[in-house]
Each structure stands twice: as structure tokens, then as C-alpha cells.
Amino acid sequence: MSIFPNAAAATSTLASPAASGTSAAGVPNYEAVRRAQELAARMGFRQDPQFAPLINMFPGQMVPDVTIPQKPTKAPVLRLDAQGREIDEHGNVVNVTKPSNLSTLKVNINKQKKDAFEILKPVLDVDPDSNPHFDPRMGVNKTKLLRPKRNNFLFVEEGKWSKDAETIKLKSQFGEAQAKEQKAKQAQLAKAKAAPDINPNLIEITERVVIKEKLKDPIPEIEWWDLPLLQSGNYGDIADGSIDEDKLKMEKITFYVEHPRPIEPPAEPAPPPPQPLKLTKQEQKKLRTQRRIAKEKDRQEMIRQGVIEPPKPKVKISNLMKVLGAEATQDPTRLEKEIRSAAAEREQAHIDRNIARKLTPAELREKKERKLFDDPNTVETLVSLYRINDLSHPKARFRVDVNAQENRLTGCAVISDGMSIVVVEGGSKSIKRYGKLMLRRINWSDVSKENEENDESDDDKPVNKCVLVWQGSVAKPSFNRFSVHDCITEAAARKVFVDAGVPHYWDQAVNYVDDGAV
């Protein structure tokens, strides 16, 4: 509730006679009354109609509630001359500007900006004679600025997507190293296919490389060291080995000696350094022991001279009394605590050293691959040819196929009615492991399909077994991967080897005679 009943009372109270109502001479103080009215209006006091004549008697007052009526504006009059142009009341022509349609859409604004932006293309045809400021070293190169238009289509090569899918599969299964190895092997196979077909049993002889001798420089008319000394620039002024001083540039002859830049004479490269002597295991062990003894003696000598600090005594709970002696009986609890903390510190240091020496997962994978497989850069490819009487059992087929893929071998397994042939190509370690599988690990008599289907055995039929027909090395592999083929006839089985370019594998297996056969 306000202490003032209305705005007039507040105004009269705030503007006291001594301060703002009247001055000492009885003249009204208009500035003080105006401030009081503004303050009362801001404080929210209403205006009383009883005191309206008193308030309106002061000119220049600012009361928000009082509205001053405005005079009505005249309606605009349109005036035109004889030519239909708009004029004002004085007869002057009024320039009417037509409103322009401004678009507010972002698409239209960007289009207007793009149309207004002008890209100045470089002038490609510059005449050096007409332009004195042209520098040929800073000229515009047409081949680098303008890209030639491609008028033809670029088709995807056959087999590109299958190769990419195979690479992604290998990366997810074996890792980045195996994918790179497979990619290099595919490039090598593509290069080998492009080469003319040769007999793989022949030994390749590289072409003779003819080293062309470097042509010698022609004999100059005058040597470079004589050219700055002669006036004429040639040896024509020299007669009988003598020359006059007037034909020489005497200012070039001084007491300084000019040494030419030394040039090493052409010679053959230095021979390779001698290879270290190969030692046996026992000799390597003996040398290692001698090196460790010498290193320990050097460390003891440095401790004796005071260069390095001696190691702390290795005190344990078991040798506490033996090492410390009488000191251990004074405060055994403190000593036991120190000994246990030192032992824990030594154990943690040992664990940290082992963790630091531990290989990362990538290094472990690389080490395992080096152990299981040969170097992928080896040129030699080993081939093993096996002949099996019966390979129709699913278990035997699965083991033959999966082991070949896990050992990264290429080749094929051809199953026919009379016999089956397995050919594998790869490194020496993989071939050796696969040979143990075929000749020792698989019991071919137990996986015969006829023995499972028929309990009655046929005495005339030979026992199922696997024999190694041939093993050797070839210049390049003949198969891209390992696959299994079921053939009804022998002609279809031989065609598999003919397509691979090795029909002699089939002929050799067919004509093979086992010496140990009964």
C-alpha cells in the first residue's frame, strides 16, 4: 500500500516548497516539479483528476498518461504532367524507383553470388615479343593447367573385384602381412602366365648381359687449362714448341698455383669383406662364458676403483642372521620389513624386464610365420606328387584340402574311378609337413569308403595306400590355389593337368610302379 494517495499528492510531497515548489521569491520552480512528476510516474502513482488543472499549469511537463492529440495528415495527391510523369506541387518531375524483387532464399542468393563471381582464366597464348615482361621460366604450362578431356570409357578389368575381395578376406583372416604376400604371389603368377610356356623341368639360364662401354669424350682442339692463356684461343700461334709473349695473356700468369679438382680414376668395386668363421654350438657356448667372465671382472675392477657404486647386499629372510649378524637382533621387525620390501622391489624389476622383452602380438605373429613358412622371396618352388588308390572318403578329402590351404600350398587333388592324384607346390617346410600328413598321419586303410559301406572285404582289391611318386623343384608354380576335382573318366582327369600346363604329372602317376607292392 502506497503512502501517497495519488500522483498529485506524491508530486506535492516530493517537490516541497523549499526544494522545488516555489523559490524564496514565490516564483514556481518548474525544473523541480518536472523531476518530481517523472519520479512519481516511474514509481507507479496514478493521476488524480482533481489536481489536473494544477499539474497542467506547468509548461514542458512530461507525464506519460497525458496524450497530446495530433493533427490529421493530408492524403497524398497524385499529380501528372502531359506526358504522364509524376510531378510534385512545384511542377518538378519525381523520379520513382521501382522496387526490386529481392529473393531471401539461400539457393537464389548463392546463385547470384556465383553469377557475380568471375574467374579469370590464365592467358595461355603469350607472345614473348609483344610482352616485354614475359619470363619463359615463369610461363604458363598448358599440360599442367589444362587437364585433357577423356573421350573414352574406363572399364574395370576382369577379376578386379574378386582380387579385392580375396585381399580383404586374407586381411581379416591372417593379417596385413599375409595379404601383401598373397598380392605379391598373384603378381608373380600373372607375370609367369604372360611369359611363354616352357618345360618346368628345364633349368632356366639368364640372358647374357652385355655391358656397353662408355664412349670417350672427343679430343678438344685446345685444353681447358691453356684456353685462358692464349690470345687467339687455339694452338695455331705455337711454332716449334715456342710462342711469343705478345700472343699470351701475361696478366693471367701469376705466382699462384692452381690445383684442379681431383677426380677419382674409374676402377672396379672393392671386394666384399671376409665372412666370419662359423662356430659350433660348443664353441659359441665357450666364447659366451669367456665374455661374461671378462665383463664381470671389469665391473669388479671399476667397483674397486670407486667409479661405480657396489651393489646392495642381497639380504633374504633365510640369510638374515648370516649377513647382518648382531644388527639383526637390535630391531628385527624393522629389518624384516626392509628385507621384504627390497625382495618385492627385485621381483617387480624382474617382471618389468620380462615385460619389456616380451614381443608384441604383431611380432609374435611374424615370428610364428617365419617359423612355419619359408621366406616368400625364395625363387625355388618344390613340388610333391602323390598317388592314392581311393580318396573318395569325405574325412580324407577334408584333411587333404584343409591342410594344403593351412600350409599355403597350391596344387590340386584329382579324384577318378581308378586312382586319385594329389599335387602340391610350395616351400620346403610346408612340403615337409604335408608329406608327413600324407605318408604317416593318415591311415588310408581305415578311411576307405568301401570298408565302411561293405563289411565283406574283397580279397582281389589292393589295400588303400598313398605313395610319393615324385618330388622336385620347378622354376614357377603351375596352379593359383589348391582345389579338388571329381572326374568320372581318366580323360577328364588328365584335362585338369593339361589346362594347368603339366600333363606329364598325370602320365608319371599312371606309369608309376611301386617297388614295395605285393
Image (tube, helix red, strand yellow):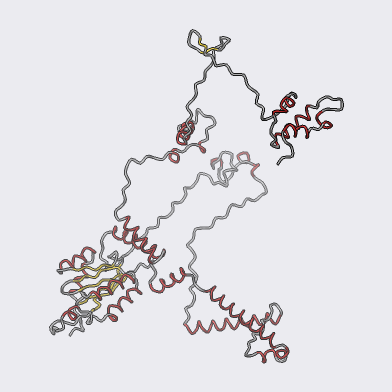
Q: Quadrant of residue 226?
A: top right
Quadrant of the rendering where the C terminus is positioned: bottom left
Residue in the image at 39% along x and 69% along y = 375
As drawn, the residue found furthest toward the top would be: 82
Looking at the picture, does residue 486 appear above or below residue 29? Answer: below
Looking at the picture, does residue 193 appear above or below residue 36? Answer: below
Looking at the picture, does residue 50 appear above or below residue 509? Answer: above
Report the side of 476 relative to 505 (left or right).
right
- Give the percent coordinates (x, y) of residue 394: 23, 74
512 or 52: which is nearer to us? 52
- Give the percent coordinates (x, y) of residue 477: 30, 66
Looking at the picture, does residue 355 appear above or below residue 231? Answer: below
25 or 385: which is nearer to us? 25
Number of marks in picture:
0
- Give the percent coordinates (x, y) of residue 270: 49, 65
64 or 273: which is nearer to us? 64
81 or 51: which is nearer to us? 51
Q: Quadrant of residue 60?
A: top right
Tell me, yes or no, if residue 121 can be seen here.
Answer: no
Residue in the image at 25% along x and 69% along y = 412
Q: Quadrant of residue 160?
A: bottom left
Quadrant of the rendering where the N terminus is positioned: top right
- Give the percent coordinates (x, y) of residue 209: 37, 59
As drawn, the residue found furthest toward the right would be: 24
